[in-house]
Image (cartoon, rainbow, N blue to C red):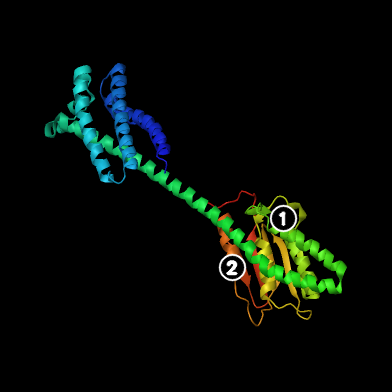
Amino acid sequence: MNSSVPIKRLLQTAVYTSILIGTLAIALHAIFQSVSVSWFLKIGFTLALFIFIVWLINIVLFHLREKYSDSFPEYIRYISSYIICFTLVVFTRLLLRTVIENDNPVEHFVRHNSEIDHHRGALHASFLLGFALNTVVLLIQDLMLLREKKIRIELENAELKIKNVEATNQQLKQQIHPHFLFNSLNTLKTLIKKNPDKAEDYLVMLSDFLRTSISTDIPNVVKLKYEIKLCNDYLKMQKMRFGKALQYTINIPEEIYNSKYIPVFSLLSLLENAIKHNVLTNEMPLHIKIEKINSRIITTNNIQPKLTPEPSTRSGLENLAERYKILSGDEVIVNKNENEFSVSIKMLDNENSNHRG
């Protein structure tokens, strides 16, 4: 932590609290005792100045603690603070006796609190007052430093989360492409033999899909339009590969394409998982449906599990749930019964969505 940041705020707080505490310290005495305005201002300024000096002492000690943490333990900072404060009390009393004479605020305090005067004396009362003021300053200072530390930790955690999302997105790209590219090339090979015109269209779509999906400029959160285009391109290519064995519908209103956002590759990874883990035949086609219900996008497919399940590469649901939690703080809702499997994700309102909790 750069100590100059909290020190600047500590100095600002020192000014405000010195005036406030100094005023409150003599307010009751001024209300119940007959004092002049000049006395109130003079003694109020003196107390405020005393408290401000106490603040400066503690700020300097904090700075030394930050700079020489190995040789300056925390308890030394507190002990030094009280020792210097008590020394300052003695010096202030001597100064007030010399300069202000009968307007000594401690003398006024003791004079009208005979019990303290009887048992502890004026000097003890001064030390008690100094101890109380120094304790209040230390409490305020430590609370501010704890808050600064909490903010710093939250910012560091947020930065780590963002870096984790970026790394996860890159990992997801690398996981999708090898398996998909291998199958796509096999499909292209077959199309070239059977239907050259269709093979050419397929190659154009494959090239466009790969160029778009491996771009390093893709943000973590994209417009719905971008993700739907990727899904359309992906499903069209898979349709060329599987024919009637794959059926799909995308029912998303176009008017929200540019106003809503979702994590990149969120729908695409669900489509890949559906095709990867289910049997696709003309007799038993896989039906995939992408639709909007209220503020969520729901991807649904019928369940036709393969006899030999393929190993997971974390490019699917688990990956999506982790990324979505980091980006939006929202949960991915999964529903599964004997016949259908569905995943529901909430649409985001802006591209800067980034959870900080």
Q: Residues within 10 Å of mark 2 (few under 14, many from 20)?
A: some
The answer to whether residue 355 is above or below residue 338 is above
Q: Which residue is mark 1?
A: 226
Residue at disc 1, secondary structure: helix
Q: Amino acid at mark 2?
A: Arg
Label pair 2/1, CB-CB below 8 angstroms = no
Local secondary structure at mark 2:
loop
Amino acid of disc 1: Tyr
Residue that numbered label 2 is attached to = 314
Of pointers 2 and 1, the one earlier in the residue sequence: 1
Image quadrant in which the N terminus is located: top left
Percent coordinates x, y for residue 356 in the rendering: 52, 51
Residue 145 vs residue 118, the one in the foreground:
145
Q: Position of residue 290 (x, y in %)?
A: 72, 64
Distance from the alpha carbon under mark 2 to that under mark 1: 23 Å
- Give whichever of 201, 156 is nearer the camera: 201
Residue at 76% x, 76% y is 285
